[in-house]
Image (cartoon, rainbow, N blue to C red):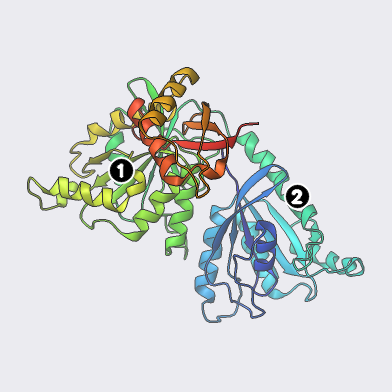
Amino acid sequence: MYKPTVAVVGRPNVGKSTLFNRIIGERKAIVEDTPGVTRDRLYAEGDWLNYTFNLIDTGGIEIKDEPFQQQIKMQAEIAILEADVILMIVNGRDGVTSDDLFVARILQKSKKPVVLAVNKIDNYEMRSEIYEFYQLGLGEPWPVSGSHGLGLGDALDEVVQHFKTLEADIEEDPSVKVSLIGRPNVGKSSLVNAILGEERVIVSDIAGTTRDAVDTAYTFEDQPYTLIDTAGMRKRGKVYEATEKYSVLRATRAIERSDVVLVVLNGEEGIREQDKRIAGLAHEAGRAIIIVVNKWDAVEKDEKTMREFELDIRSNFQYLDYAPITFVSAMTKVRLKTLFPLIQQAYASSHTRVKSSTLNEVLVDSVSMNPTPTDSTGRRLSIYYGTQVSVGPPTFVLFVNDVELMHFSYRRYIENQLRKAFDFTGTPIHIITRKRN
């Protein structure tokens, strides 16, 4: 399901981070009564009226050349380009400033829907001071108080109204969504181009795509696919993909829309910390995963090199032990034919359904081979029965006598037994324990 993105923007010291924390319900952003303290964009998840959305907190935008201002402006512009809806914050106590007008002009050029929130309106009497903000040309100003939470619900109501328009624009698509994620320069775009080739490609623009990501339709063995390339944003004026956080956000948005995720590594450079961080996002989202080592043609190797690299991957990505690994070269197209059979297998695995009777036979056999654990008081875990409740990923509910007795190691044991009994290659599986009533 598509998750919209809201960027919180405005000049410094208008209370963006305070409102950001208020919306997400925690103190994640640094709040300090000093202009410009937010240097980088911060990302979190918010929800309102049954909508879940990504929220971006940005540094302040100013005209004057203060330290970090150019970088902060670039980051805010990136956030604006990435956003579906923009929440502009102004300071009701200061009135309209030249910086507010400057930011408003940037937002008008973006052609994105903007909700204008006038912050620091801490009581009803102050509401008369918001009307001068109509001159920003961004529509109705909404009075809010970040410190007290007043009026924030009305502003968020207006934000989610724009989500309904976004949903209407997103067409149902029968294709299997395959995203390529990874840090910059691992060869994601080159892989897409190599897969598509020259003459056997069906290319189309797909409605509702992530801003500035490239979606390409492709057909393999009569099955339609959508390839989602999360390569770096093209240069637009002075906007660059310059931070690790930005690539992580792009990966997150692509993963949300994917059925299968290709985690692309650079065979020349080996494994980096950012590789593990980005791969972890796909695992936590429950997507089917394939690890693709690109640029294998450029690696000096002998008969042991591939095996050693594979062992290194398994050591660094222990939580992805279910994910198949393939070594390819976008440059020479070596082993590219291995990709789609793996994609088909991973997608099928993630949509596998197991009959309750068969599942419970496996559970009974598993418990007989390895009895359930007991706690310090001698109480033993009892697994009464299990059932599968969803796919993508396969999710199982086990009804037990006490959920606290399900130790992590035994949950892992049950998962391994399920993997032995059924083909879940390429997909995580989720096990949920519930107390039987």
Residue count near mark 2 (Cα–Cα under 10 Å), binned few <14, some 14–19, many ≥20:
some
Find residue 410 and report its horizontal and vertical position in percent. Answer: 42, 41
Say if 283 sits above or below 9 in the image.
above
Q: Quadrant of residue 401?
A: top right
The amino acid type found where label 1 is placed reads: Ile
Q: Tell us which disc is closer to us: 1 or 2.
A: 1
Find residue 215 and report its horizontal and vertical position in percent. Answer: 44, 39
The answer, for residue 241, to whether it is visible in the render is no
Find residue 136 and report its horizontal and vertical position in percent. Answer: 74, 64
| Residue at the left extreme, as displayed | 302
Q: Considering only order in the chain, which callout, 2 or 1, is on the residue closer to the N terminus? A: 2
Of 318 and 120, which appears nearest the observer? 318
Q: Is residue 145 left or right of residue 330?
A: right
Q: Quadrant of residue 10?
A: bottom right
Residue that badge 1 annotates: 291
Which disc, if any, is residue 214?
none
Quarter holding the C terminus is: top right
**What distance separates the C-alpha of mark 1 from that of mark 2?**
41 Å
| Residue at the front extreme, as displayed | 378
Q: Residue at x 48, y 43 (%)?
A: 374
Q: Is residue 46 left or right of residue 333?
A: right
Q: Secondary structure at mark 2?
A: helix
Say if 36 sits above or below 51 in the image.
below
Marks 1 and 2 in Cβ contact (< 8 Å) = no
Q: Residue at x 73, y 44 (%)?
A: 49
Say if 393 sits above or below 256 in the image.
above
Q: Is residue 157 left or right of residue 308?
A: right
Residue that badge 2 annotates: 158
The answer, for residue 106, to whether it is visible in the render is yes
